[in-house]
Amino acid sequence: MTNRTKRQKHAILALTFLTAPGLVSAQEQPQRIVSIVPALTETLFAMGAGDQVVGVGSFDTHPPDITTRPRVGGLLDPDMEQIFALRPDLVLLYGSQQNQAEQLARAGIQVLPYTHGGIDDTLSVISHLGMQIKRPNDAKRLIHSMQAELENVRARVAQRERPSVLLVFGREPGALRNIYASGGTGFLHDMLEAAGGRNVLAHIARESLQITSEAILASAPDVVIELTYDDRMTQETRAAEVAVWNRLPAVPAVRNQQVHLLLGNHFVQPGPRLAEATTAIARALHPEAFLPLLELAR
Amino acid sequence: MLEGISAISTVSSVSAGDLRRHIWLVHIGFGALAALTCLAAPLVGPTPISLRAVFDQSLPFAQNVDAQIFFIARLPRAIAGALVGASLATAGVVLQALLRNPLATPFTLGVSAGASLGAMLVITFGVPLAVLGAAAVPVASFTGAVGALAIVYGLATMRRQGLSTLVLLLAGVTLNSLFSAVILFVQYVADPAQTLQSVRWVMGNLDVGSYNPILWAIVPMGLAGAVFARLPRALNLLTLGADSAATRGIDVLNTQRLAFLSASLATGAAVAIGGPIGFVGIIVPHLIRLLVGADHRLVMPASAFVGAAFLVACDVAARTVLSPMELPVGVVTAMLGGPFFLWLLVRHR
């Protein structure tokens, strides 16, 4: 908790500091925005500011409109020349890209550095971004709709038993090796808890950790949720990747066929579709809470 | 270290009976060390398991957590560690003798870089290379190793009759850098998540998860091992120089060819299942030379046993120290092996 508030404070501090040189123009709504952070690009479009987006990052995929915008690199390879050439008045980049932030600030361009955290951090980032682009009401609307969806999920799963869950988000293809799972902090953990699951690695204060197969056997999760951003995966590959888990038959999740492979980049990008992703996890964990009958009864 | 290798002439003055006794001692002593380590390793771990439960026949395997921790999470790792450790250590011995260079490692001649490139390509582009139950990454990695081996061997035999160890070394080192550059490029264009996977792969990991990759690797490793067993006497003479070895009735070209191919095969198989785990292939041979002298009839078996024991022990550390987090075994071998070897080096001077 303290960690999170501290991070928020840092984000706000960084925001005030880095936007200071651009204060003169800060009064007007930014008209030309470059975003290399997929989650923020998506947020801009969700707030109705898509027309102002003039450049996007290499890994942006959502919404489909972004394919018409020039790509200006990513976390490791931001193309500063191209960014300058797009004459942006606001650039959204990663918090670790301090070099680039300084260059932009020197040119009088507003910068919003991004760090991700839990669900609350995601919502406060959206709120900051809304203020920055002078669309506070759009931001509020987006946040409210996300919160409403999250509340809906929480309400549906509230009375249900919370299964213990291992949330995997990276693994060597075709093998149970180099398995990365969510620890007890960060948006993946928050999403899992909101979706009515109990993270078996909740006691580890890290966003991610590489876990041994022994630890998987020892922690005996009731459910394994595996997230992959690759949504072009074929049905056969999908089945094969789920079947890989059969090598650990003592894990309750494997024994009871509770290994779920969820596809889509919204699971790994804490943006506007975070609530949608949470719903998908909740549906995998508690399918009975989403039966059409209940849908009608509500 | 150089004088260690060239001290063979003095070693060979030991009487035949003494040598036979030494060989026996080495096999029994170091063999026992390796066997004990391999037997003890699956018993050690962050989760307490009971041996009685492990071998409890009344409970079906599918429900027996203790048995699964033992047979799935620990035993394959110990076996893989022993095979990879023995292969890398003996490949190191052979290559150091073949190249007459104490700095040679199993990774000097480009084989591991080829293996890494193969693995990177599959991790990044998802080439469906899975064959007969073997996972795609090890298959691609072994294919890459064989490709690199073929290129280096082709280059070293192209210019003149015979095998030029100088060309072998230079071609290997150059190919290493070239492949490393391609690997960096592939990692750079990859998604961050894939880059994380491939960077992690390079750090080495023995959590093989099943016996399948081990069964596959045993074939090339066994082949290489059979060749290794016949090499020691020829290697002793080869370290004195190709010419003097030839005058003593050694088929130099054939020995060099066998040494290079078998060491590369062992390395390729080891990297395919464990990733490029560093330090084993250079520390263990030198440690053994400090302990038993430079005669390859002693160094070869001793290195195999100690390499196996060392890597199995390092892997126990890798899976226990930060549990439930896995520590890359390549990091452990470097952090334990490096300082220990330096200490040994200083102490023996």
Image (cartoon, rainbow, N blue to C red):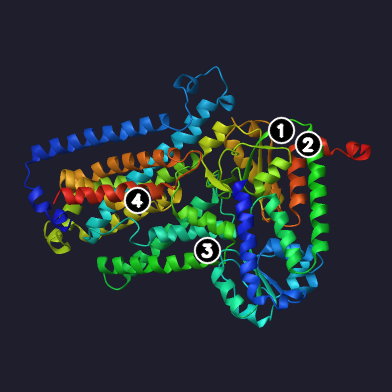
Query: Is any part of residue B91 visible from this angle?
Result: no
Whether the residues at callouts 2 and 1 have beta carbons within 8 Å, the answer is yes
The foreground one among B285 and B98 is B285
Disc 1, SS: loop
Residue tagged by mark 2?
Answer: A157
The x, y position of residue B128, in whole percent, is 59, 55
If you read the primary sequence from the N terminus, does the residue marked by circle 4 or circle 3 appear first?
A: 3
Q: Tell if the residue under mark 1 belongs to the same chain as the one under mark 3.
A: no
Residue tagged by mark 1?
Answer: A162
Q: Tell if the residue under mark 2 belongs to the same chain as the one under mark 4.
A: no
Disc 2, SS: helix
The answer for which chain carries disc 4 is: B
Residue reaching furthest to the right: A296
- Quick check: B171 above or below B262? below
Determine crowd level at label 3: few under 14, some 14-19, many 20+ residues with C-alpha closer than 10 A.
Answer: many
Distance CA(mark 1)–CA(mark 3)? 39 Å
Quarter of the rendering containing residue B261 = bottom left
Amino acid carrying label 1: it is: Arg
Which quadrant: the C terminus of chain A?
A: top right
Disc 3, SS: helix
Residue tagged by mark 4?
Answer: B334
Amino acid carrying label 2: it is: Val
Whether the residues at callouts 4 and 1 have beta carbons within 8 Å, the answer is no
